[in-house]
Image (spheres, rainbow, N blue to C red):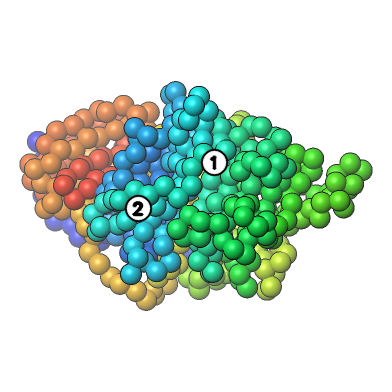
């Protein structure tokens, strides 16, 4: 292997030279690539074990160390998950939630689509976490209405220890108003999968109806439940979810503002959105933010925006809420310069950092998909400080000459691969020592990521050759 640098340089978890920054009022957010090259991250969730949990739409659950980005595959259900030919459409491994009493009951809930008698259906599963992988699969509910499109399905656990699960209409608009169908609803379940006795419709999982395809759920102040929902071509919605309420689809799109809509709304007590977007921007995962690390975002809902099919509108929207959480006072927009579909976000409760799952530039998700961290480095966090599970550092980055990699000892003896952003593998081999370098000309100008895998998991780093 050619030697480029003889100097010794210091590095922290995954801080590279000249990291990009983004200004939010008086707060500077530094950008890091946590993981590169995963396959359509759909849900990212900060877990009670202080790791980021992620569903890959193709059928895997990942556990990611936020210190360095080490990735472990803790569940592989690719053989059971129905994602469609060529990984197209909107099916797959979707919503994820964790048991609220994690220390005593470490269970994980997840939704995925599957093939059933020629149709696409969803099931809600529960697994035990044994410290290494997810085991002891239990089906809580299955034969839930789904489709190639409009399959939902976000999960969350409410303060009263109930599961909320969004479902889409599966492309069949009649399901949303049909109480005999689970399609186009928000369902409410006990943690064991049974129907809660205090559900608004006795004996039914249905908590609210008249939804088209809600793909965001979070809880704000005073126990308020928010949801984001896709419209057809107009009227993407941001709603407050009320037990037993009707949200109007397919008769009503957005607010009740036509003669037929007003008649339906009056007869069915329809809840109108707090805000709607026309043309549709493709709203997705949401997260309530109230951390002091980014004071400009306190008491706001962070909204992932996938954007239009023509490459428009992609961004993170910050919806500033009133003190009581019942109205939106303003919307700010960030990260549109990436021109990447944003699928979901989660928040580090210690540092206040925001993690953003990008799904590439094309529908439904093109590679290389990236999870980025945006952190206020000036904020003094309170929480556990750990060394990364394993690590790769890149220097210099970006580079106009050559590039050098330093590997943690756990990766020495394993294999590496360098992949360009067109998905082509350009170099691979064994990591024979903790330092590896390439001279100028070994790699053409462009953006790459290096991937290394050991028994402890996978680490990736993005780098640029100018």
Disc on the earlier residue, 2 or 1: 2
Residue drawn at the location 69% of the way across and 73% of the way down:
324
Q: Is residue 364 at least partly visible in the picture?
A: no
Q: What is the quadrant of residue 286 in the picture?
A: bottom right
Label 1, secondary structure: give it.
strand
Q: What is the quadrant of residue 100 in the picture?
A: bottom left
In this rendering, the answer to whether 247 lies above or below 147 is below
Q: How many marks?
A: 2
Compared across the picture, whether 207 is left or right of 418 comes to right
Residue drawn at the location 35% of the way across and 42% of the way down:
60
Compared across the picture, whether 243 is left or right of 113 comes to right
Q: Nearer the viewer, residue 49 or 398?
A: 49
Residue 420, horizontal then vertical, whole percent: 32, 32
In this rendering, the answer to whether 83 lies above or below 216 is above
Residue 101, horizontal then vertical, whole percent: 39, 69
Compared across the picture, whether 8 is left or right of 270 comes to left
Residue 7, horizontal then vertical, whole percent: 13, 53
Q: Which residue is under mark 1?
A: 144
Label 2, secondary structure: give it.
strand
Q: Which residue is under mark 2?
A: 127
């Amino acid at each position: 292997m050619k030697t480029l640098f003889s100097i010794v340089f210091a590095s922290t978890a995954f801080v590279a030279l000249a990291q990009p920054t983004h200004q939010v009022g008086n707060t500077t957010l530094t950008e890091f690539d946590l993981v590169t090259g995963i396959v359509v991250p759909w849900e990212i969730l900060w877990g009670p074990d202080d790791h980021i949990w992620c569903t890959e739409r193709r059928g895997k659950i990942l556990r990611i160390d936020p210190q360095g980005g080490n990735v472990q595959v803790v569940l592989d259900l690719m053989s059971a998950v129905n994602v469609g030919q060529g990984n197209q459409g909107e099916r797959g491994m979707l919503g994820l939630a964790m048991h609220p009493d994690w220390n005593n009951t470490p269970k994980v809930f997840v939704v995925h689509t599957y093939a059933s008698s020629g149709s696409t259906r969803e099931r809600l599963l529960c697994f035990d976490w044994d410290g290494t992988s997810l085991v002891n699969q239990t089906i809580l509910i299955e034969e839930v209405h789904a489709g190639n499109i409009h399959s939902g399905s976000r999960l969350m656990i409410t303060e009263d220890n109930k599961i909320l699960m969004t479902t889409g209409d599966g492309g069949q608009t009649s399901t949303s108003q049909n109480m005999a169908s689970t399609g186009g609803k928000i369902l409410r379940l006990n943690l064991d999968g049974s129907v809660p006795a205090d559900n608004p419709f006795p004996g039914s999982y249905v908590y609210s109806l008249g939804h088209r395809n809600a793909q965001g759920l979070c809880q704000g102040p005073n126990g308020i439940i928010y949801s984001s929902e896709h419209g057809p071509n107009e009227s993407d919605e941001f709603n407050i979810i009320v037990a037993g309420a009707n949200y109007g689809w397919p008769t009503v799109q957005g607010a009740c503002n036509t003669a037929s809509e007003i008649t339906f709304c009056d007869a069915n007590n329809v809840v109108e959105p707090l805000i709607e977007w026309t043309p549709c921007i493709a709203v997705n995962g949401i997260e309530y933010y109230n951390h002091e690390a980014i004071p400009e975002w306190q008491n706001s809902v962070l909204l992932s925006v996938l954007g239009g099919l023509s490459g428009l509108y992609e961004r993170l929207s910050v919806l500033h809420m009133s003190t009581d959480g019942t109205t939106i006072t303003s919307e700010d927009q960030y990260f549109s310069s990436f021109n990447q579909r944003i699928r979901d976000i989660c928040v580090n409760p210690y540092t206040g950092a925001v993690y953003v799952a990008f799904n590439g530039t094309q529908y439904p998700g093109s590679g290389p998909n990236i999870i980025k961290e945006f952190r206020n480095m000036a904020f003094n966090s309170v929480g556990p400080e750990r060394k990364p599970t394993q690590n790769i550092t890149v220097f210099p980055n970006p580079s106009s000459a050559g590039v050098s990699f330093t590997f943690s000892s756990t990766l020495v003896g394993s294999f590496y691969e360098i992949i360009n952003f067109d998905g082509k593998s350009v170099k691979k081999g064994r990591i024979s020592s903790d330092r590896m370098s390439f001279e100028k000309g070994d790699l053409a100008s462009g953006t790459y990521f290096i991937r290394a895998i050991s028994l402890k998991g996978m680490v990736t780093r993005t780098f640029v050759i100018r």
